[in-house]
Image (cartoon, grey):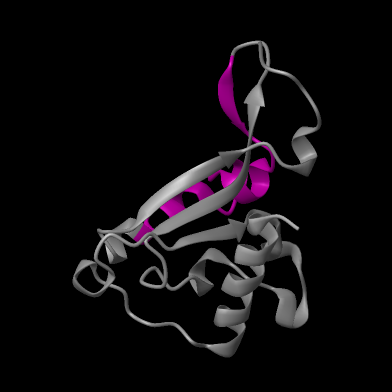
Amino acid sequence: MTLFPILTFIFATLVALGESHVLSQSNLGSKVIMCYFSSWSCYRWGNGLFEIENIDPFMCTHLVYGFAGLDKSEYTIKSLDEYNDLEENWGKGAFRKFTNLKNVNPNLKTLLAIGGWNEGKFVLI
């Protein structure tokens, strides 16, 4: 079992239980608390529905958005779900909302994961 599913489970459990604690540099020292947000969680229903607005930006020091893709011909980052990720064509603008969490917590580091199931298998040379 890899560490990634465990961290995802821990994050989801903490959110479900409402056990968010305010983190600051003073009580963290040099610790890194990495959390993962699965962008497709906005398509779940009932208790599984989880959107960027549900994220407590003080729970983690680093927050990873999963996923974006890589254009293999131009080697540029691309959206894998334009409706959810982008604002164009009445999209939900998740990329911007996610990055704007830094306005609430300026110490938060936001990252973008490249790959994922929708990206498929490819080799970079």
Q: Position of residue 81 (x, y in %)?
A: 69, 43
Q: Is residue 101 visible?
A: yes
Q: Is residue 59 left or right of residue 45?
A: left
The quadrant holding residue 48 is bottom right
Name the residue at 69% across, 60% down. Answer: 5
Q: Is residue 111 left or right of residue 88?
A: left
Residue 10 vs 118, above or below: the answer is below
Which quarter of the image is occupied by the C terminus? top right
Q: Is residue 55 left or right of residue 31?
A: right
Q: Position of residue 76 (x, y in %)?
A: 56, 21
Residue 21 is a magenta residue: no
Name the residue at 49% across, 87% down. Answer: 19
Residue 114 vs 54, above or below: the answer is above
Query: Which one is in front, 87 or 49?
Result: 49
Q: Is residue 93 visible?
A: no
Which quarter of the image is occupied by the N terminus? bottom right
Magenta residues, as a range?
75-101
Name the residue at 58% across, 54% down. Answer: 92
Q: Position of residue 120 (x, y in %)?
A: 80, 32
Residue 47 vs 29, above or below: the answer is below
Q: Position of residue 84 (x, y in %)?
A: 63, 51
Query: Which one is in front, 36 or 32?
Result: 32
Name the residue at 70% across, 57% down. Answer: 40
Query: Which one is in front, 37 or 45?
Result: 37
Residue 59 vs 109, above or below: the answer is below
